[in-house]
Image (tube, rainbow, N blue to C red):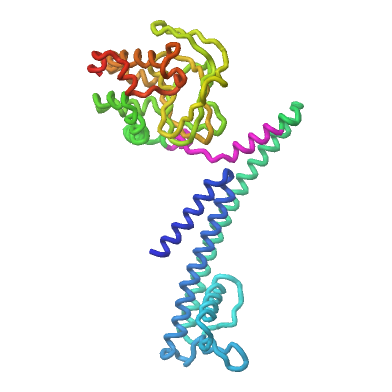
Amino acid sequence: SRIARMMMVFNRLQARFQTWASDSNRFTLLGLASRLIFVLFLMNHWISCVWYGIGSSLLDFSDTGKTWLDMEITSKGFRYRDAGEEFQYLTALHWAITQMTPGSMSVVPQNSFERGWTIVCLVIGLFASSLLISQLSAKMVRVQTVNKDKLQQMEMLAHFLTRHHVPLPLAERVRCQVRERSMMKMPLTIDDLPSLSQLPLALRQELWCSIFGNVLLSHTVFYTWCLSDDHLLHALSFRALELEVFKRNDDVFAPMHEAKKTYYVRSGRLQYAREVETHVNINPDEQVLESRSFQEDKPKILVKSKDWASVIAIWCAWSYVGRLLALDVVDLVSIDVERFLEALASHPWIMSLSRGFAFAYSLLSLTPGAEHSDRVDLDVPTSRVFGAMPIDDRLQF
């Protein structure tokens, strides 16, 4: 159990290195090298303990009457057996390491037991050292290949900027951004795994529901819908939801762009600020937007894990009036509104039931001076929307 805990510590240190560094290849290589060295020393520790045990306990069974501990260290007859425990252990460890490396050692087997154990250790060392070195070499080749591709990309970028006479300050900013963003470690999405498309349809639907089901059920309205039909959760998860990743300083959405998706934050932080003023009539479908900056007047809102954004895209046709900016590498679940509504088309009573909710949502976010107008592109608390609904619509819902 002590050894298992030590291995867990090394694994956590390697994971921490990956978290600290954007260029995780070098730190992963460092972690792998540290772990291999640790395994090598641990193996040699066991071998040295057996070697010392043979020398100290099997004297009576020695066919020569001697063990390696009876070898003389000095010309005055001082033996290894007469030395201290620290020296004996370090000597045994030194002997064990030489069985796996080309190193030399003055200690040699003195009887058949020791000779047999030496042969066993040489065979173990042949395979163990080859395996450890091959793993390290393979990782180093992989890192070199990745770095080679990055260097080629940077050289091509420099050639492109020079050829098009890009000013030096701008070119340097471009290079810094490309270098920084290329070193960011991105979470995997479904698009990164084309092998999933080879799964049977039923298994893919089950997998999608396992990944996205909890996201839908975390929203009160979607949870209420899914309670009414066991198959609705599978249909929505498979047809309308997907994973998206944004790098730091990426815009998830920007003002004047049509809202076509709703987002759920799985990890990372984002910042939202309203930038344009809008005058909206609740009954018509059109909006009149005035491009007046609100960056100084409107507060910036922090959007974090488990928050929703762009929920208004589900309830009405909408163009964004603010900007949602990624502060970190952000892992999102996106809902394609068009496919989402298509999946709901077979449940007309849900569409009818939700009209009152959509109207109350609009009152709280779209009208001039509304309570939640500063976060209209994000989400309005469901409890607040229910409170704004007429009591008859609330009871039906």
* Residue 23 x, y percent position in the rendering: 59, 45
Where residue 211 sits, quadrant-wise, is top left
58 and 291: which one is in front? 291
Q: Is residue 192 magenta?
A: yes
304 and 42: which one is in front? 304
Where residue 342 sits, quadrant-wise, is top left
Q: Is residue 339 magenta?
A: no
Q: What's drawn in magenta, residue-wise?
A: 172-195
**Which quarter shows the N terminus?**
bottom left
- Horizontally, residue 127 falls left or right of residue 390, namely right
292 versus 265 height, above or below: above
- Horizontally, residue 335 falls left or right of residue 145, namely left
- Identify the residue shown where x is 57% and y is 31%: 249
* Residue 379 x, y percent position in the rendering: 41, 23
- Identify the residue shown where x is 59% and y is 79%: 105
- Identify the residue shown where x is 39% and y is 18%: 314
* Residue 251 x, y percent position in the rendering: 54, 26
168 versus 279 height, above or below: below
**Which quarter shows the C terminus?**
top left
313 and 136: which one is in front? 313
The prevailing secondary structure element of the residues shown in magenta is helix
- Identify the residue shown where x is 62% and y is 48%: 144
